[in-house]
Image (tube, helix red, strand yellow):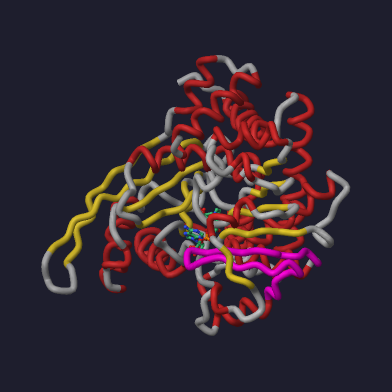
Amino acid sequence: MNALAATSRNFRQAARLLGLDSKLEKSLLIPFREIKVECTIPKDDGTLASFIGFRVQHDNARGPMKGGIRYHPEVDLDEVNALAQLMTWKTAVAAVPYGGAKGGIGCSPGELSRSELERLTRVFTQKIHDLIGTHTDVPAPDMGTNSQTMAWILDEYSKFHGHSPAVVTGKPIDLGGSLGRDAATGRGVMYATEALLAEHGKSISGSTFVIQGFGNVGSWAAQLIHEKGGKVIALGDVTGSIRNKNGLDIPALMKHRNDGGSLKDFHDAEVMDSSELLVHECDVLIPCALGGVLNRENAPDVKAKFIIEAANHPTDPEADEILAKKGVTVLPDIYANSGGVIVSYFEWVQNIQGFMWDEEKVNMELHKYMNSSFQHIKAMCKSQDCNLRMGAFSLGVNRVARATLLRGWEA
Ligand SMILES: NC(=O)c1ccc[n+]([C@@H]2O[C@H](COP(=O)([O-])OP(=O)(O)OC[C@H]3O[C@@H](n4cnc5c(N)ncnc54)[C@H](O)[C@@H]3O)[C@@H](O)[C@H]2O)c1
């Protein structure tokens, strides 16, 4: 089941659980606006190239719409629609005052030069500048885009509307980005793990962890868990997997990786078969790489007691059922990886205030938001007698439904 089907299924289950009126249920699924634009740029060799860009604004009942812009050859309207809808529920679970949006351009960023990417980003911004804005729709980086892309959008947008740092988040610090944004998703994963373990009378210190993915989210999660006294006993990325039953020395591994080394050449670990990573013995498994990695083939062999979904959609619905029967507790992505969007909200707030927070304040506020969402999800699980995934979806859908009804929806 792909991300679109899974999101719609979770939404429908949550709507039934909450007893939403069928008209409201239907209306919550319909996007506010779908934008499709043709972006034509001169390539470096003088020829013209055209790319299709999308922005789907799903819902703004709770505030300006928020969501990433991805550059990827498979970007299409269906996918962008599903991801925009997911952002509506995710911002509501996090209790940040935003709705949901997503955008993208169908292109292969690796095949475009830096100046071609800049021209493409500027043309896309020229086509959508009237439809985004600090209080309307606030883009952020996603797959294939980064802080530089946001800097170009900010610059192009500001030509039309005056200096507007809050029109995008995930910016470079020099242009109004927030301290702590780089680590935010991994830090949020660590706070979420702490909250879940505490609920079960456990802590990060003294628990064993297996992490798939050592990119932005995985490497920050590994470092912060290590700092809290957790033992990361196995870790894998696209190049391979390693283990050390006494716990990997994560700071040394980071240094090794930053010096250009690959996981497999790390001196203080044993190389293992990557197919065994997700079924390795441990207390907590944290997938931080791809979607769909836990499926009906490997779910029966999972030995972890807790799974923290740091990646988007790592557990397919069949695996979810198998894991539930085995008594494995799954902390859903819609909450577990929300640290990034929460700190994006802090970035927007700082830009509007014109006042930069120190990193300590960013991390402290993130901790508060992650803990508070966890308590609200638990309360929803109790009142609806459901698992954490449905508790989180019901919390998000209920908040959006309440805002919609309060605003009134007579045309
Ligand atoms: N970065 C964020 O703020 C953020 C926020 C929310 C969700 N996410 C999700 O978290 C996940 C990771 O994002 P990221 O920003 O860390 O990406 P990234 O590109 O920085 O890192 C991805 C990691 O996954 C590894 N990987 C790729 N294919 C793999 C494979 N077949 N087997 C094992 N490892 C593999 C890569 O080697 C890399 O270490 C994605 O699902 C993303 O959608 C990220």
Does residue 86 appear in the picture of this structure? yes
Percent position (x, y) of residue 93?
65, 40
Q: Residue at x 53, y 15 (%)?
A: 22
Q: Nearer the viewer, residue 297 or 136?
A: 297
Q: Residue at x 58, y 37 (%)?
A: 319
Q: Is residue 38 above or below residue 29?
A: below
Does residue 95 appear in the picture of this structure? no
Percent position (x, y) of residue 289?
53, 56
Percent position (x, y) of residue 43?
18, 68
Q: Nearer the viewer, residue 394 or 55?
A: 394
Please identify the quadrant where the N terminus is shown: top left
Q: Residue at x 60, y 68 (%)?
A: 242
Compared across the picture, whether 250 is left or right of 139 comes to: right
Residue furthest bottom as drawn: 259
Q: Is residue 105 above or below residue 298?
A: below
Q: Which residues are magenta?
A: 229-250
Instruction: Examine the structure image and report whether residue 238 is included in the region drawn in magenta.
Output: yes
Q: Nearer the viewer, residue 66 or 274?
A: 274
Please identify the quadrant where the C terminus is shown: top left
Percent position (x, y) of residue 191?
74, 55
Q: Based on the displayed image, in which of its 4 quarters is residue 245 positioned?
A: bottom right
Q: How many marks?
A: 0
Residue furthest right as drawn: 201
Q: Residue at x 60, y 27 (%)?
A: 401
